[in-house]
Image: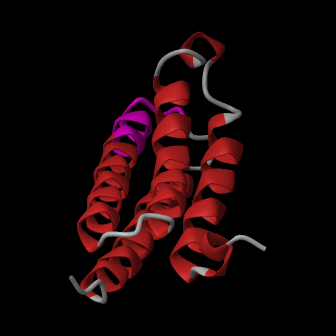
Amino acid sequence: MEKFQELRVWQEAKALVVFVYKCTKVFPLEERFGITSQMRRAAVSVAANIAEGSKKRSARERRRFHEMAETSLEELKSHAMIASELAFFSDAKDSEAILEHGRRVGRMLARLTATIRD
């Protein structure tokens, strides 16, 4: 098992990726290279940056990767709100579920970042 797999925040971020992929399967086909791709890439980026940051030796580098994960999380939330406005979700509750899951990952990430000492 890789070190990052033990991080609860990475586990939650990975679960968010899976949920986003499932939700976006029903988006209009013409959005495959638009918002569908953007949402998936943003979600994957959150988990990837947490994983990558876990390998960095300096506190500054770990914080930098956590910040990138946080910005990707905000991007994902923005896309989810827009997709909801466009009625792309098959279940209107899916958008709110993505937002709530994103908030939870964000809180966990903030707590992890706060533990990093120089």
Residue 21 falls inside the magenta stretch? no
The residue lying toward the viewer, choosing from 69 and 79, is 69
Taking 10 as reference, is 91 above or below it? above
Q: What residue do we see at 56% from left, 40% from top?
A: 89
Q: Main secondary structure of the magenta part?
A: helix
In the figure, residue 14 lies in which quadrant?
bottom right
Please identify the quadrant where the N terminus is shown.
Answer: bottom right
Seen in the image, is 1 located left or right of residue 92?
A: right
Q: What residue do we see at 32% from left, 85% from top?
A: 111
Furthest toward the right, the residue is 1
- Which stretch did the figure color magenta? 79-88
Q: What residue do we see at 60% from left, 71% from top?
A: 4
Could you say where residue 42 lies in the image, as x and y percent from the top left? 45, 41
Taking 88 as reference, is 15 above or below it? below
Could you say where residue 71 lies in the image, as x and y percent from the top left? 28, 50
Q: What residue do we see at 42% from left, 44% from top?
A: 80
The number of numbered badges drawn on the structure is 0
Could you say where residue 72 lies in the image, as x and y percent from the top left? 36, 47
Please identify the quadrant where the C terminus is shown.
Answer: bottom left
Furthest toward the front, the residue is 57
Could you say where residue 22 lies in the image, as x and y percent from the top left? 71, 46
Seen in the image, is 49 located left or right of residue 81?
A: right
Seen in the image, is 77 located left or right of residue 27?
A: left
Render colour scheme: secondary structure
